[in-house]
Image (tube, rainbow, N blue to C red):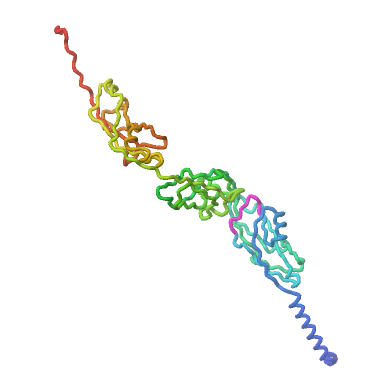
Amino acid sequence: MGHSVFWTLFRKDIGRKLTALGLAVGVWFWLSSNLAGERVIVLELRMVETRREAEDSQVGVPALYVVKPNEFILLQGDAVEAKIVVRGLKADLDALQLSAVFEIPPDALGTADEGSFRLALSDATQFRALGAALDDLDLIVSPPEIELQLAREDRMTLDLGPDNVQLTGVPKPGHKVDESRALVTPSQVELIGPRLNIKAIRDNPALLVFQVIDLEGEAYTVSRTVSLDRDQVDRTVRLALIDSVTVQVPIYEEDLVRLLYSVPVRYENEEALGLRGMRWVDRTETVDIQVIGPKELLDTNLYSDEQLLKKIHPVFDWADARLPVANIDVATPNLLPDSIRIEAANKGGTPQIKYTLEEIATIPPTNVTGDSP
């Protein structure tokens, strides 16, 4: 009986009822497809020093802002961006700007200098939505957490010099590089970086090097502005306040070498030998020398060999002869400019002489009176 009544009521005006049902389903599908939607937003990870900085920045630049304590440096993360699937009304999704602020606690590393910290990203309360109400959105964050490699920050002041300069290339023929006089400006910088990296540089300052300077074909002092060489210096180590330094590398014309052969040696104070009961029996009479100095001072148009010999006087004082046979340095005073030096020909160093001494024979005194002893 009940079944018949139900069937009678359902069958009555069934056409209109089915039409209404179809319209309702159609409206539901239309609303579902036109009002509800899904959007994928990719946000990069940005490290900041303060929450105020993060909140001010996220208004104009959507990102995942991570506030780190001042004493920490980010070494690396296993993800530099995150994907957020957002579900909600299409009208909200079209104008949506999404960002978030997370914080690393001060005790993230405990007492260690370096280590990892897992930062959870799935907490929806950390997100901020512009153009829509966050409560009306459904967020799915991937990955739900990221692993950050952190290090404690350290600072040091470093004096810069030639050891921090890298050079390559050969200057113009006839010229030479004086690497030892490479000048870095500023000569002192402050470094910021992970504690372990800074300790290594403190122990060996030459680990901090700047970009390579090419000297190929150069004939004059080279000046270049260079930054840290990131192939040699970890990216986490940086200069405070500045990004680069200026390096000046002196390049000079090579010294001219003039060879002078058989230069007479002047021996002085021979009486000093007699007072000791000695005399020389053999000695070096001449030495071969090389005169080395700037081309503009030693050019043959300025000095002939004869003129040079008048200004250079190899000399040896017999008072300095302490051994009966010896090879010994000989002084080479000269009247040439200080930039000119005298060396032994071919081998360099101070010219040497060789001498041999012997004792003077003594004659017994004679008896002049003729008396018997």
Which part of the image, by quadrant, shows the N terminus?
bottom right
Q: Residue 52 occupies which quadrant of the picture?
A: bottom right
The residue lying at 37 percent from left, 32 percent from top is: 334
Left or right position of 187 against 25 = left
The residue lying at 81 percent from left, 91 percent from top is: 15
Q: Residue furthest front?
A: 301
Q: Residue 132 occupies which quadrant of the picture?
A: bottom right
Observer-nearest residue: 265 or 46? 265
Left or right position of 308 against 78 = left
Observer-nearest residue: 341 or 3? 341
Observer-nearest residue: 251 or 241? 251
Which part of the image, by quadrant, shows the C terminus?
top left
Q: Point out residue 62 in the picture as x, y percentages from the top left corner.
A: 69, 62
**Residue 224 visible (yes or no):** yes
Q: Point out residue 219 in the picture as x, y percentages from the top left corner.
A: 45, 48
Asked whether 243 falls inside the magenta stretch, the response is no
Magenta residues (range): 68-76
Q: Point out residue 149 in the picture as x, y percentages from the top left corner.
A: 59, 57
Q: Residue 134 occupies which quadrant of the picture?
A: bottom right
Left or right position of 137 against 107 = right
**Residue 193 visible (yes or no):** no
Observer-nearest residue: 82 or 248? 248
